[in-house]
Amino acid sequence: MTITVDDSAVKRIETLRTLQKKNGLMLRIIVEGGGCSGFQYKLELTDDVGSGDVEFADVIVTDEISLPYLEGSVVRFNEELIGSEFVIENPNASGGCGCGASFAV
């Protein structure tokens, strides 16, 4: 199973590592049940990687339960005038809610 990590996400995590002085800092992506469409992403910065975790490009980490929902996804970091955010382009998402906070598979 694979997740593609765009260079923009790698650069942002590297910047955050420098700012927080944590060389092992990673972006954890968790897929949870909830939201109006059935599933939602939970993103958090962590330097705690467990034995059941799967790492991608040394900057993204997820758990084995979330991984099938993320298969084939691309993780990017978008920086725009109105704000910046990590974006997950998930080919498994068959639909989403109007606010963009949840998705269906």
Image: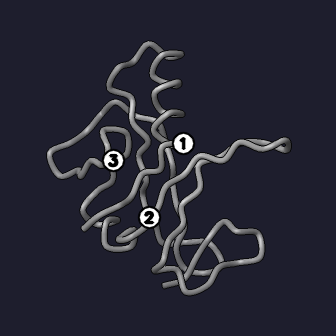
Residue at left offset 43%, top offset 53%: 29
Label 2 secondary element: strand
Q: Amino acid at mark 2?
A: Val
Which residue is at 52% across, 73% downward?
Answer: 39
**In the image, residue 25 lies at what x, y percent?**
39, 29
Q: Which mark is residue 8?
A: 1
22 is higher (above) or lower (below) than 53: above
From this viewpoint, which residue is outermost toward the left? 51
Q: Amino acid at mark 1?
A: Ser
The residue nearer to you, when weighing 61 against 52, is 61
- Residue tagged 2: 31
Front residue (pair 49, 7)? 7
| Numbered tag placed on residue 61 in the rendering | 3
Observer-side mark, 1 or 3, equals 1
Is there a contact, CB below 8 Å, between mark 2 and mark 1? no
Residue 54 pos. (x, y %): 24, 52
Marks 3 and 2 sit apart, C-alpha to C-alpha, by 12 Å
Measure how far apart labels 1 and 3 are at the Cα level: 16 Å
**Looking at the image, is mark 3 or mark 2 earlier in the sequence?**
2
Residue at the limit of the structure toward the front, as seen here:
7
Position of 28 compared to 35: left or right? left
Foreground label between 2 and 1: 1
Q: Position of residue 94 (x, y in %)?
A: 55, 86
